[in-house]
Image (cartoon, rainbow, N blue to C red):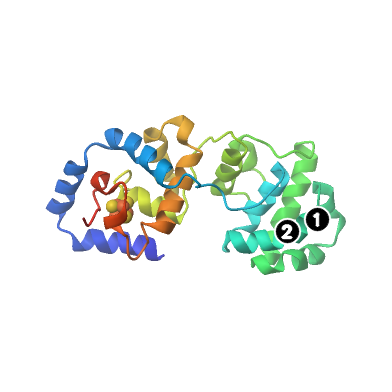
Amino acid sequence: MPGLACVRACRKSLPRSYLKEARRKAGPQRQRIGPIIERLAIEHADAAIALRFRSALELLVSVMLSAQTTDVNVNRVTQTLFEKYHAPEDYLAVPQEELERDIFATGFYRQKAKAVRGTMRMLLEDFDGEVPRRLDELVRLPGVARKTANVVAAELGEPQGIVVDTHVRRLSQRLGLTRQEDPVKIERDLVKLVPLPDWGRFPHLLIWHGRRVCDARRPHCEDCVVNDLCPSSRV
Ligand code: SF4
C-alpha cells in the first residue's frame, strides 16, 4: 500500500531525534486534536460520504459493494440496482447468478453477491428485515467487517467507533495521533483522542484531506491548514 510505504519510508529516512523534536514542536496530541478538527472542518466543509443511498438498507448494500472499488463505480451500479431491489426479500427472490450479474461491475461479484444474500437472510431471520444500529449486531451480518459496520452506524447517526481506511491510517500516523499500524489499534487510539460528537465526521475530514492535500506519495505540506500542528510537516 503506497501510503503506508511512504509513511514507513519517511520515518526511516528521518533521524529519530528529528522526529522527537518535530513531535515536541507540534505539541501534545490532546491540545492539537481540537484545532485539527476545527480547521479541517472549515477547509473541507463538504466532506461527506460519496456513496448515494436513500435508506439504511441501500446504505448497507452500497458499503458492502464498495470493497476494492471506487464510490463512483458503486454509485453507477446501484443507480439501477436499487430500482430493482427494494427490500431484503428482493435479493433472495432471484437466483444468486442474477444478483452476480447485477453487481458484476463492482468486482469480486461472486463473494459480494453471496455476502449480500447472506446478510439479507439474517436481516429477515434475526432483525425483522431492518438494518440494526448497534455495531455488535452489524458485525454479525455475513461479509460485514468492523469498517463496514462503523461506516453504516456513523451514517445512520449513531457512530460507535471511528472508521479507519487507508487515508485515515496514513493521516493519523502523519499527524502523530497514533504510532500503530493495525486499523483496530489505530481506532483504539483515535477514540481516546477524538471527542465523541466528532466520531462520525472525523474520518470524512481525514479522507478528504488525504485526497486533496495530504497525498500518499507527495503531501502538499505548504498548502496544508494544519502544517503547524503536524510533526510530519515538510514546511
Ligand atoms: S503537514 Fe503535510 S504531512 Fe502533515 S497533514 Fe499536512 S500535508 Fe500531511
In this view, which residue lies farthest toward the left? 17
Query: How far from the left and from the top, in percent, is residue 64?
Result: 64, 54
Report if residue 108 is visible in the image. no
Q: Is residue 4 above or below residue 125?
A: below
Image position of 10 (left or right of 119): left
Please name whichever residue, 79 or 163, is drawn nearer the observer in this view of the structure. 79
Q: Residue at x 21, y 43 (%)?
A: 26
Image position of 17 (left or right of 137): left
Query: How far from the left and from the top, in percent, is residue 161?
Result: 50, 38
Image position of 208 (left or right of 222): right
Q: How many residues crowd around disc 2 within 10 Å: few (fewer than 14), some, or many (20 or more)?
A: few
Image position of 214 (left or right of 205): left
Please name whichever residue, 139 or 33, is drawn nearer the observer in this view of the structure. 33
Query: Circle 2 sits on which residue?
Result: 79
Return the mark for residue 83: 1
Q: Residue at x 53, y 35 (%)?
A: 160
Q: Amino acid at mark 1?
A: Glu
Query: How far from the left and from the top, in percent, is residue 45?
Result: 47, 44
Q: Amino acid at mark 2?
A: Gln
Please name whichever residue, 83 or 145, is drawn nearer the observer in this view of the structure. 83
Q: Quadrant of residue 37?
A: top left
